Every structure is written in structure tokens, then in C-alpha cells.
Image (cartoon, grey):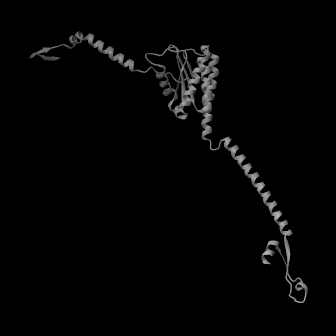
Amino acid sequence: VDLQAAGRMVTCHPMSWIRSHSRRLFAAAFVLLAGMLEGQTPPIPPAPADGIRDDARAMTIEGRKSVAAEMQKFEHRTGIALFVDTNTYLEGDQTAMDRSRALIAGWIGHRPGLVFCLNRGARPVPLIFFSKELSERYPEPDLSLAAAETMESMARVSAPENRLPVGVRVMMNRLRALESANASRNRLFHRHDIEMMAGFGALLFVTGLIALLIIRFHHKEEAIEAVKHQFPDVEVSQRFSAPGGGGVIVEVSYRRLGELRNSA
């Protein structure tokens, strides 16, 4: 390498230049490697078949089997994916929130679901994180209340190995209730509405029947009154010599008393 300095040509051999700057090169390489490692996200393990990755041994074998079976039935009926991830510690500067976001992206994807993430080295109670699709499925205040009730129920459990099973069951019950309320709101006719319409129809039927009976009774009374108050209308030939005009009935018709008075 030829370098020109102060108006004269200086020849520098590559190896001697590297030896003279070896410390700086090593420091630069170390900083570059540290930056690459810091920005690298720890790999996510494959999704567990039963929905539970218990690396921290936070549950007993029996408790895990029982709650895993309930989780699979819950997902089949509601379509909501539910996973549990427990860790003794998290690598590097990763937090439970970072871990949960990565798990939701890798295990749940674009489905409605949630993750219980436990970092036992940081806190004894797991955190709960919902996917975007689940947050859009139910009102946010309802999900927040369900998470708060679940966290409170786990905090009341004294045995550490029972906290997660209790919390998972409480959350599934809350989500079932939200799903039922959601289905009820989307139904065209609710049971209460059907009962009200049936009662209203029965009331209309009884009212119509009573009105029909009243009308028939009224018509019957009118017919009786017509027979009572109709009198024969007699037309006679005039004979001035006979009392009252004399004569014989030649035509008989029946009119009501009021009609007779008007014609008189």
C-alpha cells in the first residue's frame, strides 16, 4: 500500500499495518458481535402437542394431564387456542411480554387465542397475553376483567403447582361466558323475546275470542228486540161508513216502533 504524506511516498506492508492496529480491530469486531447478539431474538421452541410447555416444572404430571385435556376440549368447542409456557428464566434481556408476543406469533398466528407465560425467575404468577384476533372478538373491558379475575384466583392459591391449573380453568370459564353472551347478542330472536311474543299472541287470541262472543251476544239481543218492537202495518181500503174506516188486511209488513212513529 502506498501512502503519500508530507509530499513524500511511504510504503506500508499489510501485515505490519494489521499488527499495529490489531487491538482496535479486535475491539471493533467484539462490539459488532455484541450488537448482533443483542438484536437477535432467542429461538421459539415448537408448539407443544397438548398446549403446555412446562420447562419450569410448575405443574404436577397429573395436574398437567387433566388441564391439558380440558384445554383441548375448550379449543374444539370455542375455536380459541390456549397455550401455557413456563420458564425457570428467560435468556438475555427478554421479558415475559417479549416472550409472549413471540409465542403468539409462532404458536397461534392469526387465530383467536391466548398464552399463559411464566418466568419463575422474575415472578411466581404467570402473565396472560391475548392475540389481536381474540381482542377483536370480545370487548376489551370484558377481557381485562377476565384476566384480572384469573390473576386474582392464582394469587390466592398457596400451592405453587396448583396455580396454573386453577388459573387456566378460571380463564376458560370466563371465555365460555363471553362466548355465550356473544352468541346471544348475535341471535335474531332471544328466548326472552320468543316468550314475550308467545304471551302477546295468546293475549290477542283471548281478546279476539272475547270480542267475538260479545258481538254474537249483541246480535242475539238485537234480534230479540226486533221481534219485540215490530208491529203489523195494515193497509185497508177506505169505507167512510165503517167505524175507523173498516176494511180488511190486504198487506202486512213489520216495522219497528220508531219507524211507525215517523211514518204516522
Q: Is residue 201 left or right of residue 172?
A: right
For this view, does 264 lie left or right of residue 125?
right
Q: Position of residue 36 (x, y in %)?
A: 36, 19
Identify whether 243 is placed above or below 255: below
- The reply to whether residue 49 is in sight is no
Position of residue 131 measured from the top left corner of the image (x, y, whole percent): 51, 29
Q: Is residue 198 left or right of residue 122?
A: right
Q: Note whether 263 is above or below 70 in the view shown.
A: below
Quadrant of the image occupied by residue 172: top right
14 and 82: which is toward the camera: 82
- Relative side of 239 to 8, left or right: right
**Residue 142 visible in the picture:** yes
For the point 75% across and 53% down, which residue is it?
Answer: 207
Expressed as whole percent of the image width and height from the top left, the position of residue 62 reads 65, 17
Q: Residue at x 70, y 43 (%)?
A: 195
* Count of marks placed on residues: 0
Quadrant position of the C terminus in the picture: bottom right
Residue 261 vertical placement versus 157 (above, below):
below
Which sits in the foreground, 245 or 205?
245
Q: How far across and how far down the image is residue 250, in percent?
A: 87, 83
Q: Residue at x 78, y 75 (%)?
A: 262
The quadrant of the picture occupied by the N terminus is: top left
Question: For this rendering, which residue is in front, 98 or 252?
Answer: 252
